[in-house]
Amino acid sequence: MTRWFDQMNQELTDYQQQAADLTWRGMIGVATGPTHLLAIRRNRWREWKCKEAISFPESDLDDQHRRMIYILCRGPRYTDRSITKNLKLRGHLGWLYETTRVCLRGIGCLRSEPDLDLLMRENRDPETRLSVWQGLRDTIGPKSRNTFETLIALENQAARASGYSDIGQCWREELEIPHLIKVADDLFSQIAPFYQLLHAFVRYRLGQFYGERLIPLVEPIPAHLLGNMWSSAWDGMMDIVSPVDLGLDAAVRRLFPTAEDMLKSAEDYYASLGLPRMTKRFWEKSFYSVSNNSQPTSCHGTAANLFKPGDVRMLLCTRINWEDFYVVHHEMGHIQYFMAYDEKPMIFQDGANSAVQETIGDAIMLAVASPEHLFATGILNNTSPETEMTLMLMLALNKIPQLAYGLILDKWRWDIMASKVDADSYNELWWKYRLEYQGVRPPVPRYRNSLDPMSKFHVADTTPYIRYFLSGFLQFQFLDVMCTDESKPARPLHKCDLYGNKVAGEKLRSLMENGLEKPWNEALGEFSNGKYITVSAEPLLKYFSPLVRYLEEQLNNQGIPIGW
């Protein structure tokens, strides 16, 4: 019995290494040849292994073996033909996303990431922003709609072949959270009052800047005027929302003039916790500087595990600014996770679930972004109450709208996967949810043949998104656990800097070393010494409580209406 599991893990290692190598070469624009042959071989191998595993007497299996079988055999079932067609459809959507350009007079033709995203963060002209916003959606949406619809039907067929109601149920199963849809709705309901305060404050400031013709005081906010290309993070318009300029971009450029400098800074923070530094292979093979002569196929920030000793990498078309200072810390969190569980059997070499995998880097970045640490590194020049509140507002503008967006994106896809909406109403449903949850509207009429969510990488890449919603809560729980020190007086959570805290680092290492071996809530319970066994909104609300009070005062004093 043990020999079977050892052999299975060895064979899986070979497949993982081959797949990771093909994926990496594809991302950096190196020809890979046909990828479907490996996928077919792996799918046949998995089918055979699962048939063998089903025949094992239950009494001969221990808990670890049962979990290995569960992880190996869960998910959709494909035929050779369906897996080939699936890869072709996915490849077409990815190609459309990566090759789509929006051409602007006097500027040139720009790709979505990083070019259009940066323009939407920095340009304040409403007409230019509208041209970019509409141009991307009108270019990519109609061309991708039929492929998207066909892919969902194919995925549903594979899911039902494995006993699921639809592919959305498969996606949700990976999180191992019973009744996930209800859990997600309940979590959002707890932070919705905070979101509405933030929305009202931002709408008021935008109205002051653009005028009430563009931003009426009691209506939804036009999506092209909110921070980034997707209205998912609003910190890109801090200069409009707050009169205080923290100067973070300028400070990052001054202190870390190259991409390698930013990476070394992130590495130093993790190392101060007692976690390992990046490997030699990381520095040799990562792709983080872009020139006119050298651009990867994809510019979406990615951490890669090649499943070979020390072979971890990062891909990022790095810009020297605060946003990418965050991204390198986030992606390095993935890499720390890869290195922590690399001695586990291959079937367990993954995060406790995808939400926990996304949490590590963001939890660390919350500590990096503490006023004390930013002052110590020279990014902030003071820690006055005004500076602290401005910093907290900036973090809220980044994180709280993403919770709404993260919930909407997968609720929309789940409804499509469950056949609750016909194809002609895909885009209508999207904007229904944007209005209901976010108070955001399209700036121009949208049409039945539009597919506006395709402007988002994760839709084109067919990557589930609810992980980011859940991670938005979990990162504050992780910060709370790592910042708890019974031997010292309690401090506000937003003031917690973990630099040099090896006790916190050991807690984190212990959780990461588990990989996928334990159910995520069991791993969370051990990590938190029983304080948390599920996702909780409480630490997030505790972290932002000073900002909530500030916003309530501002809205009350100035008579600013809430809602849309």
Image: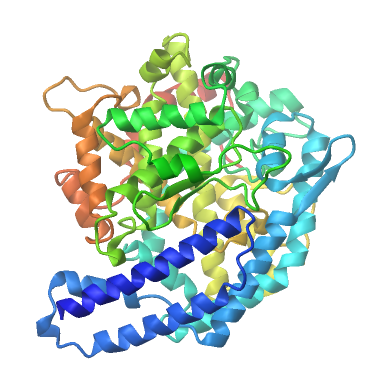
Indicate left or right for 499 with 324 as reference.
left
Please say whether residue 448 is visible from this viewpoint. Answer: no
Q: What is the quadrant of residue 120 in the picture?
A: top right
Name the residue furthest right. Answer: 105
Q: Residue at x 43, y 26 (%)?
A: 265
Q: Quadrant of the N terminus?
A: bottom left
Front residue of 372/425: it is 372
Front residue of 5/118: it is 5
Q: What is the quadrant of residue 239 in the picture?
A: top right
Q: Residue at x 64, y 35 (%)?
A: 227
> Residue 276's x, y, as percent?
30, 38
Indicate left or right for 423 with 244 as reference.
right
Q: Residue at x 11, y 82 (%)?
A: 60
> Residue 145's x, y, as percent?
71, 68
Front residue of 459/255: it is 255
Q: Report the colour scheme.
A: rainbow
Q: Quadrant of the C terminus?
A: top right
Can you say whether 528 is above or below 140 in the image?
A: above
Q: What is the quadrant of residue 290 in the picture?
A: top right
